[in-house]
Amino acid sequence: MRPHYNRVAGQSLESLASLSNNIFAFAMTLLILKIHIPSHEDIHTEQDLLHTLYVFWPHILTWLMSVLTLGIFWVGQHSQFNQLRHSNLRYTWLQLGFLAFVTAIPFTTDLLTEFITFRLALLVYWINILMLGIFIYICLVYAAKNGLVKEEVKLETYLSFRRRILTGQTLYAVGAALCVINTYWSIGFILMVQLNYAIAPKIPWLCELTA
């Protein structure tokens, strides 16, 4: 009897991880390509160049935020992969849904850069992050409920992964809500949260929340 296609398709975590690496790398590359060097015809003095670089600071700010966003989710995704024995077709498609929102980051970043004082642009960017969080959470829960997790992985490990995702998304939502005051408050708060995830500075209350 021949095995059903859905039972044998999409089982390779290595292939899924390889595709993910390429998509994340391409998305990160697009972020920097969106920052265009000023035309030489517009720059005549050191002061002109300095002024142009100052005008570029929103590009640098949103570039940094998005690099951190992609880096955090890449680490989270691969940490999840490391807990699994194998994939299956549904899990693979859930991960492809996650990667679809990874490819959207350059667009939402560019939108936020061009309209950095607009609350709607900030909310579109946050929705992109929210969808990444939703998909990676669904992937985690699906893997645990469908026997994809390695037998030696403890329940505490699963719970710590789940808590980290939910806490992170809660903090991102708080950051997005701050756009009611000012979009720069939102960006500043989100950057602070991301730096805590990325380099774990000694911010006691954040370290306790995201442990």
Image: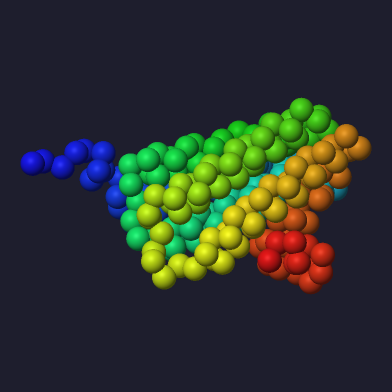
Residue 60 visible, this angle: no
Q: Residue at x 44, y 50 (%)?
A: 145
Please give the name of the residue rendered at 75% of the width and 67% of the height, measured from the top-left corner.
207
Residue 28, position as x, y percentages in the image: 55, 48
The quadrant holding residue 152 is: bottom left
Q: Quadrant of the N terminus?
A: top left
Q: Position of residue 21 (x, y in %)?
A: 44, 52
Q: Residue furthest left?
A: 1
Q: Residue at x 63, y 52 (%)?
A: 165
x and y, in percent, of residue 117 in the image? 83, 33
Residue 80 seen by the camera: yes
Q: Nearer the viewer, residue 85 or 105?
A: 85
The front one of 113 and 190 is: 190
Residue occupying the point 39% across, 64% down: 150
Classify residue 4 by image quadrant.
top left
Image position of 90 (left or right of 34)? left
* Quarter location, residue 33: top right
Quadrant in which the C terminus appears: bottom right
Left or right: residue 155 compared with residue 146: right
Q: Is residue 28 above or below residue 79?
A: above
Query: In the picture shown, does residue 101 fall above or below 74?
Result: above
Q: Which percent across, then down, holds residue 36?
A: 65, 40
Question: Considering depth in this image, is 90 or 193 the residue closer to the camera?
Answer: 90
